Image (cartoon, helix red, strand yellow):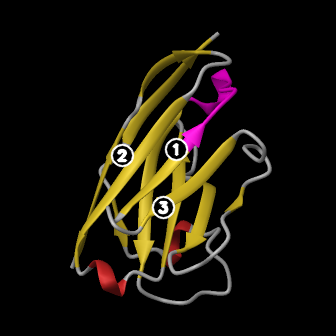
Amino acid sequence: QVQLVESGGGVVQAGGSLRLSCAKSGRTFSIYAMGWFRQAPGMEREFVAAIIWDGGVPYYADSVKGRFTLSRDDAENTAYLQMNSLKPEDTAVYYCAATQYFRISYYNPRVFDYWGQGTQVTVSS
């Protein structure tokens, strides 16, 4: 089993920044890829960013490209999502996710096996 714990959410004004963390524990060696998703009220969960844990290059949704950066710290077993130039439309609960398996792509939340509890990000205008 793998456990994921997010932190770092909060309230920020438009144009501000936040950094989310996702700490993984348990059978961490089995993780092949990690991703970040978000879900606003009444909306479906949407892809934000993903990375192959071992040497992969992160890729992003068009809506966050150039503003968000996904990184990882192998020693800390932690993934980060640095969010800059935040907009009110970025307001959502943000979730990190992990999977043990290779997939053709990681845009679909259904390919992920493990999820964190979510952290609220609110961007005020």
Query: Which numbered dot is residue 72?
Result: 3
Q: Please name the amino acid that badge 1 sits on.
A: Gln
Query: Distance of mark 3 from mark 2, alpha carbons?
Result: 18 Å
Q: Please name the amino acid that badge 3 sits on.
A: Arg
Name the element at disc 3: strand
Name the element at disc 2: loop
Mark earlier in primary sequence (3, 2): 3
- Depth check, front residue: 7 or 109: 7
**110 up-or-down from 124: above or below:** below
Query: Which numbered dot is residue 39?
Result: 1
Mark earlier in primary sequence (3, 1): 1
**13 up-or-down from 93: above or below:** above
Disc 2 packing (10 Å; few <14; some 14–19; many ≥20)? many
Q: Residue at x 59, y 69 (%)?
A: 51
According to the picture, the residue beneath numbered tag 2 turns out to be 118
Q: Residue at x 60, y 87 (%)?
A: 103
Q: Disc 2 vs disc 1: Cβ atoms closer than 8 Å?
A: yes
Quadrant in which residue 55 is drawn: bottom right
Q: Residue at x 39, y 47 (%)?
A: 21
**In this picture, which residue range is highlighted in magenta?**
82-91
Task: Please give left or right for residue 62 compared with residue 108 in the image.
Answer: right
Task: Please give left or right for residue 49 compared with residue 92 in the image.
Answer: right
Is residue 89 highlighted in magenta?
yes
Quadrant in which residue 47 is drawn: bottom right
Quadrant in which residue 30 is drawn: bottom left
Disc 3 packing (10 Å; few <14; some 14–19; many ≥20)? many
Query: Distance of mark 2 from mark 1, alpha carbons?
Result: 9 Å
Q: Please name the amino acid that badge 2 sits on.
A: Gly
- Depth check, front residue: 41 or 69: 69
Percent coordinates x, y for residue 90 in the rendering: 62, 32
Mark earlier in primary sequence (2, 1): 1
Query: Distance of mark 3 from mark 1, alpha carbons?
Result: 22 Å
